[in-house]
Image (tube, grey):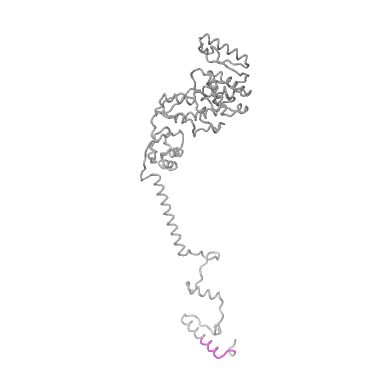
Amino acid sequence: MTDWERTAEEREAARLERERRRAAQQDTNLEPVSDDQVEERPLGTRRVSRAERVGTRSRRAGDGGRPRPRSRGGAPPPARPRRGARRWIARLAALLVIAVAAVAVWLLVELYQPFGVSPHGRVTVVIPPKVGARRIGDILAAKGVVPSGFFFNLRAMLAGDRGKLLSGTYRLQLDMSYGAALKALMTPPPQAKVSNITLIEGLSRRQIDKLLRSQHIRGDYLAATSHSPLLNPTAYGAPRSTPSLEGFLFPDTYQLRDPITVAELVSAQLKTFKAQFGRVSMGYAAAHHLSPYDVLIIASMVQAEAQRAHDFPLVASVIYNRLRLGMRLQIDATTRYATGNYSTPLTQSQLNSPSPWNTRVHAGLPPTPINNPGLEAIQAAAHPAPSHYLFYITKPCGNGALAFASTDSAFNQLVAQYYAERAKLHGRSPAHC
């Protein structure tokens, strides 16, 4: 735009602008600006974009118009957390420190029990050989000696005593501290006084009870052998109505701590039975539709009827053959069990007893074993000898041996020989001559 195209006011304004710029250049020692270099701008207002307004406001707010720094690659720098967020992070960190400290204090209190314990009473604890500290801790906790097997193991580990714990039988207090229990188990246990008790094969529960009472052994044997959590007869095929553990009380010589108690004896008998009976194969009996409990019943009759182990499988074969043919067993030992007469000749009324255990009256097996048989009788009952025998009788002068027969006529001959020898001995038994 030329001067003649401008108004007088515009030309005057341009002149004043040029003079102002020359004065500014003189103040800063700059080269003078020619008229041609001065860009003339029209006076008045102009439209400003929204982006320019925002930029202007931001420069006024804080950075004096300087552009904000950008990170490498042109991305804006990460925003600093606000003051409120920083306060919450600090609070969470403080709470975490407090929680860790509380857990540490709790662990120390549990491990070292600074407030003391209240040991009382005594309990027998058996520590098996070659078990670790954690297992020992569980045993102690189960007996009530220490509160926790886990903390006992941890305390032993921190103290370096895990490999120093000994096996054996200990008499420890209830609610002991971990330190006291560790100290006790690092000391060899005293030698316990023990006694042997022998129970022969073929004794019934009532006979064993009478024997124990005569030896002043503490406890009620009949009550203790009625039921036990250590053995469930139904697991062997016994009916749920089975009244007692007759047959499961394994005969043996047991070495028990003094003073012997009925509870410890019964526990030992049942554990031994399970171990011994588990060795017997039940395949033959199962093929003849007999349960393990049936085998135990047969074994008790074999044990009562035969004095020599050689005759055990033959007596078992007679029982199997009679059961197969549906014959009554007619075994005197079952009648003696039913009547309790173990020492004198059976009377006619006893022979006719209506008891379900009297096999002279009732067919099939008696409802329970009639005594507690040994392993040899159980093996014979599970594996009878192959035979056709249906009868047996005490062999005259056989020193306890039996004579067997397959027919009525052969049996009657054996009976005649028996009574002939008995007559010679003036009515005494001819079993031993």
Q: Is residue 376 visible?
A: no
Quadrant where the N terminus is found in the figure: bottom right
Q: Nearer the viewer, residue 190 or 208?
A: 208
Marks counted in the figure total 0
Please report the bounds of the magenta region as a residue range.
Answer: 5-16
Would residue 329 appear left or right of 99 to someone viewing this image?
right
Tell me: residue 48, above or below residue 353: below
Most extreme residue toward the front is 349
Q: Nearer the viewer, residue 88 or 61?
A: 88
Tell me: residue 267, above or below residue 315: below
The answer to which image quadrant residue 334 occupies is top right
Residue 59, how many percent across, how many down?
A: 49, 73
Most extreme residue toward the top is 424
Q: Nearer the viewer, residue 286 or 412?
A: 412
Task: Say which residue appears at 43% left-offset and 28% top-offset.
Answer: 256
Q: Is residue 44 visible?
A: yes
Residue 225, how many percent across, how many down?
A: 48, 30
Residue 19, how many percent across, how many down?
A: 50, 86
Task: Say which residue appears at 57% left-offset and 90% top-offset.
Answer: 7
Q: Is 13 included in the stretch rendered in magenta?
A: yes
Tell me: residue 94, above or below residue 286: below
Would residue 223 appear left or right of 363 to someone viewing this image?
left
Residue 82, how many percent across, how many down?
A: 47, 65
Q: Chief secondary structure of the magenta span? A: helix
Tell me: residue 150, above or below residue 366: below
Q: Is 167 included in the stretch rendered in magenta?
A: no
